[in-house]
């Protein structure tokens, strides 16, 4: 009889644990403590911000964020404490430098009502590892994720037409998809993304700036048909670069020389090809 009571008690205890009613010691499970609001305020005509004791910054409301100069951003004192940023539905913009140097930020959520992210908005957020940018975004500012040295995964929204200068410089992703809408890649856009080994350029691309892909791990690249000019040093110090396929539209040999400057490649005028002493070959469709 005693053994039967023990068995029944064990079953009831297990059931209670499953339902979350008690701890193994028989006491009630403590409720999670709600985070306390450390500070809050207004950051747009229809927007508010709040920062809590768990390190979460939340922007909520409707409309655009105020445009601040660095010294006027109301959460400047909390930059080093921000671990998570949530930009809620209704917010339409994140302006320049508003969250740069938040070097402990690990999580970023941006609602699909945001259409613009300004210059340097998340520059030097060195613990960010993954960012999803909604397709509602039509414009990114320069340096937007510059020096986010832990950023392993990021997407480019499908409505973006220009990847601005130094937008993703010094990040650490190994591949990225550039949407077909992109026509311009700015100076240093992917400079020093040292692990970048694979990329496909869209057919509508018309301009590529200086140092656009310099100091990356790219091994091959196809320049799309229709491009007529590429800024010098676009692939500077790409030591692993083996093959570059050039379209017939690029006929300026000085442009081709500048394209691969300091990557060890030389141009052979007779064969209309590039070659180098490390075994890399750059083939031209005009050959």
Image (cartoon, grey):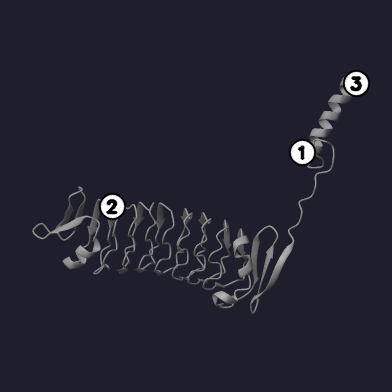
The mark closer to the camera, 2 or 3, is 2
Q: Residue at x 79, y 50 (%)?
A: 31
> Is residue 164 depicted above or below 262 in this figure?
below
Instruction: Kindly identify which numbered label has been placed on residue 239.
Output: 2
The mark closer to the camera, 2 or 1, is 2
Disc 3 on helix, strand or loop? helix
Q: Hey, which quadrant is residue 46 in on the image?
A: bottom right
Q: Position of residue 114 (x, y in %)?
A: 55, 69
Residue 64 showing in the rendered view: no
Name the residue at the right extreme. Answer: 1
- Which residue is the site of mark 1? 18
Query: How much space separates mark 3 and mark 1, taking CA atoms?
Result: 24 Å
Residue 278 showing in the rendered view: yes
Horizontal side of 247 relative to 116 (left or right) equals left
**Nearer-the-camera pick, 39 or 178:** 39
Q: Position of residue 113 (x, y in %)?
A: 57, 69
Q: Residue at x 43, y 68 (%)?
A: 160
Query: How much space separates mark 2 and mark 3, taking CA atoms?
Result: 77 Å
> Is residue 152 depicted above or below 40 in this figure?
above
Q: Hey, which quadrant is residue 89 in on the image?
A: bottom right
Name the residue at the left extreme. Answer: 270
Q: Residue at x 80, y 39 (%)?
A: 23
Disc 2 on helix, strand or loop? loop
**Nearer-the-camera pick, 78 or 59:** 78
Q: Please report whichever mark, 2 or 3, sits nearer to the chain's N-terminal start.
A: 3
Instruction: Name the image quarter holding the C terminus.
Output: bottom left
- Which residue is the site of mark 3? 2
Instruction: Name the image quarter holding the N terminus.
Output: top right
Disc 1 on helix, strand or loop? helix
Horizontal side of 270 relative to 65 (left or right) equals left
Q: Position of residue 77 (x, y in %)?
A: 63, 68
């Amino acid at each position: 009889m005693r053994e039967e009571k023990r068995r029944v008690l064990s079953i009831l205890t297990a059931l209670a644990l499953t339902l979350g009613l008690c701890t193994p010691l028989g006491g009630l499970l403590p409720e999670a403590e709600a985070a306390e609001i450390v500070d809050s305020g207004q950051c747009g005509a229809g927007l508010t911000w709040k920062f809590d004791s768990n390190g979460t910054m939340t922007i909520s409301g409707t409309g655009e964020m105020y445009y601040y100069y660095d010294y006027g951003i109301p959460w400047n004192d909390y930059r080093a404490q921000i671990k998570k940023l949530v930009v809620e539905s209704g917010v339409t913009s994140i302006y320049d430098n508003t969250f740069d140097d938040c070097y402990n930020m690990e999580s970023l959520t941006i609602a699909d009502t945001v259409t613009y992210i300004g210059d340097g908005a998340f520059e030097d957020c060195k613990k960010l590892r993954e960012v999803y940018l909604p397709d509602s975004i039509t414009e990114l500012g320069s340096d937007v994720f510059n020096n986010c040295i832990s950023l392993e995964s990021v997407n480019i929204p499908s409505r973006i037409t220009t990847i601005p200068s130094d937008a993703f410089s010094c990040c650490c992703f190994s591949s990225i998809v550039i949407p077909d809408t992109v026509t311009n890649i700015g100076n240093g856009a992917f400079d020093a993304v040292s692990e970048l080994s694979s990329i496909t350029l869209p057919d509508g691309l018309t301009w590529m700036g200086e140092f656009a892909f310099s100091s990356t791990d790219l091994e091959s690249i196809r320049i799309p048909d229709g491009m007529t000019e590429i800024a010098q040093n676009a692939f500077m110090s790409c030591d692993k670069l083996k093959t570059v396929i050039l379209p017939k539209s690029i006929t300026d040999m000085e442009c081709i020389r500048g394209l691969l400057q300091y990557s060890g490649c030389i141009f052979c005028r007779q064969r209309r090809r590039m070659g180098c002493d490390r075994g890399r070959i750059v083939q031209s469709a005009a050959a």
